[in-house]
Image (cartoon, rainbow, N blue to C red):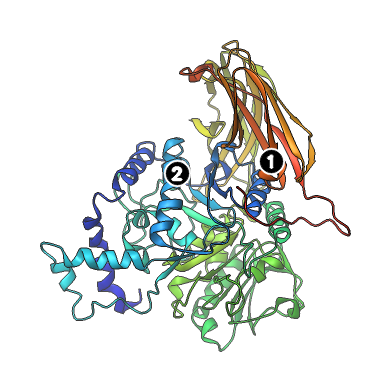
Amino acid sequence: MYRPLHRFVIAMRVFVIAMRGRFCALVCCWLLLATSNARLDAGSGPENVLLVVNRRSTNSLTIANHYQQLRQIPPGNVLTLAWDPKVEATDVATFRKEILLPILRAIEQRRLGPQIDYVVYSSDFPTMIDIDGDIKSFYDAGANFEQPAWYLKLDPKAEWPKPLTKVASITGLTYLWQPAAVGNPAYVDLRANGYAREGDSSLGFSSSMNFGPKGEVLPPGAMGRRFLLSVMLGVTAGRGNSLQEVIEYLQRSTAADGTFPRGTIYYCENDNIRSRARDAGFPTAVRQLKSLGVEAELIRGLLPSKKDDVQGAMVGAESFQWQTSGSKILPGAICEHFTSFGGDLRAGAGQTPLSEWLRYGAAGSSGTVTEPFAIKDKFPLPCIHVHYARGCTLAEAFYQSVAGPYQLLIVGDPLCRPWANIPLVSVSGVKRRATVRGVITLTASAKFPKDSAVDRFELFVDELRYAVCKPGEPIVLDTAALADGYHELRVVAVEAGPIATRGRTVLPVFTANHGRSIELSVDPQPKVSDDAVLAIAANSPGSSEIVIMQDCRLLGKIPGESGKLQIPAAALGLGPARIRAVGVVEGKPQQYVWAEPVTVEVSPRQTTGKKVLSASGSQP
């Protein structure tokens, strides 16, 4: 830890006592929900992602549409919030009220607490959070304590330490959700991240893990630090990337999964303080990578020069122009640079932004959103590439390598995993698109590209985990407990070992136990211009109303058992938009019936010249 800050951070840990009653009911409820079904294991995939979308932003909707399809994220794991896309920075109270707490409520209300490990923002959310309000509340509470001995210990140095600058990133505060949710500025602790670890070992992540003060994983039920991996898929405002660039690098990163790439990780060493802050760890990381069979080089200079195999880069530089390097970034690469304002993506900000790496093909990058004072605990350490090469996801690799992430903005594909040993899953007992009744029994098996074994299989029905079994054990599902109609059975194989790599197969089925039916049609489809109006028709005999949604976002309701809605195609965002319908019988959830979703491909209206994916403006 940055030593002059130590006593100050101890005081902030005590501050949480003074916050009792503020937001604690929600946070405690969420904790109990997750802990009561705590996973004693690690490893994550799309079924463990909450994808957060700004419904007022066409760019945000568009990026989410593509990412959901690329990564097979369940519709029930998509949350839409309303945020002014022109607002790139906000205060911590507004962030808590309008973004963080609604996310935690949604996880609780949807019964997703035991399985959500990632909170992934699409785009057009505030990247910079002013935390001065929490700091002032901390001081006010300290002054009013009946026995303020802990506060007085700060004298005569009670002034806020200058290196703990008062702007946080949205991904950092979301990751450190426990103190952030209750307004406790202990999230600035430069050892706040108990999941961080040196490159000697790597660990797949689970939000149910409790971490002790030294980063140890505590036994189930113990009270410790818990986290939620958080990454932003893209920033399209200011100095960010174009919409087209974001879609392309997400497509590249998805295709990189499990490819065991043969490129080289480059650690660039120079005399700049931005390099010297981390370069002591370069030789060890190079040795560890080579022991894993991954090429790595320690080179002198600002950037890799004329290299066509950049599988990763760690750079210390204020400014650079990648195109002058003559080098090529390969799919799945993590590339980032240590500098003060790499995560400040507002127009007119100084220094090269993290978006430069993504523009030229990186799967992920990061940067601090304000002056970090060259404190290495605020940045990824060289072991980030070691964790990644062991098979961790991009988000796992980032957060295992940064001790104090409150100011670090991470952008890219959180699920990218080029070196993961991904199992190929097979299931017997049900066929795709089968109509099923009563009890069905599934048997799962899996094969790995490299020698390994399955620890367990998990069955998800739609977005919810339904059952867990060991290899060779049957999975029994009583379909009569489900609403009639369309469902997705997702069988996930989890690899034995600390990384717990996951693979899956998704089987669409139709249940028919309660005599219910529904039909959904969308016109025009499957392709539509964004200036068109969609006519959505549904018929469900016996329903009191039919609810029409894009994923879990309400588009409208049809009263009675049949009718039509008209929805502007532009309201869905561009790309593959999934429309769902459920026939409702008031007061009888088991009598609901789900239609097979319809996916429409929304394209930008034709203009003269080359057709380019683009979007701008706000949604109503």
Figure quadrant of residue 427:
top right
Q: In this view, does 42 lie above or below 201?
A: above
Q: Which mark is in front, 2 or 1?
A: 1
Q: Where is residue 159 in the image (x, y as percent from the top left)?
A: 27, 78
- What secondary structure is found at the residue carrying circle 2? loop
Answer with mark 2 or mark 1, whichever residue precedes in sequence: 2
Q: Where is residue 147 in the image (x, y as percent from the top left)?
A: 10, 63
- What secondary structure is found at the residue carrying circle 1? strand
Q: Which mark is residue 41?
A: 2
- Which residue is found at the position 84% from the left and 56% from the top? 611
Amino acid at circle 1: Ala
Amino acid at circle 2: Asp
Q: In this view, does 405 lie to the left or right of 599?
A: left
Where is the N terminus found, in terms of image quarters? bottom left
Question: Disc 2 vs disc 1: Cβ atoms closer than 8 Å?
Answer: no
- Distance of label 2 from label 1 (alpha carbons): 33 Å
- Which residue is found at the position 62% from the left and 64% from the top? 237
Badge 2 crowding class, 10 Å Cα cut-off, few under 14, some 14 to 19, many 20 or more, is many
Residue identifier under label 1: 577
Badge 1 crowding class, 10 Å Cα cut-off, few under 14, some 14 to 19, many 20 or more, is many
Q: Is residue 20 above or below residue 335?
A: above
Figure quadrant of residue 108:
top left
Q: Can residue 571 be seen in this view?
A: yes
Relative depth, front residue between 582 and 322:
582
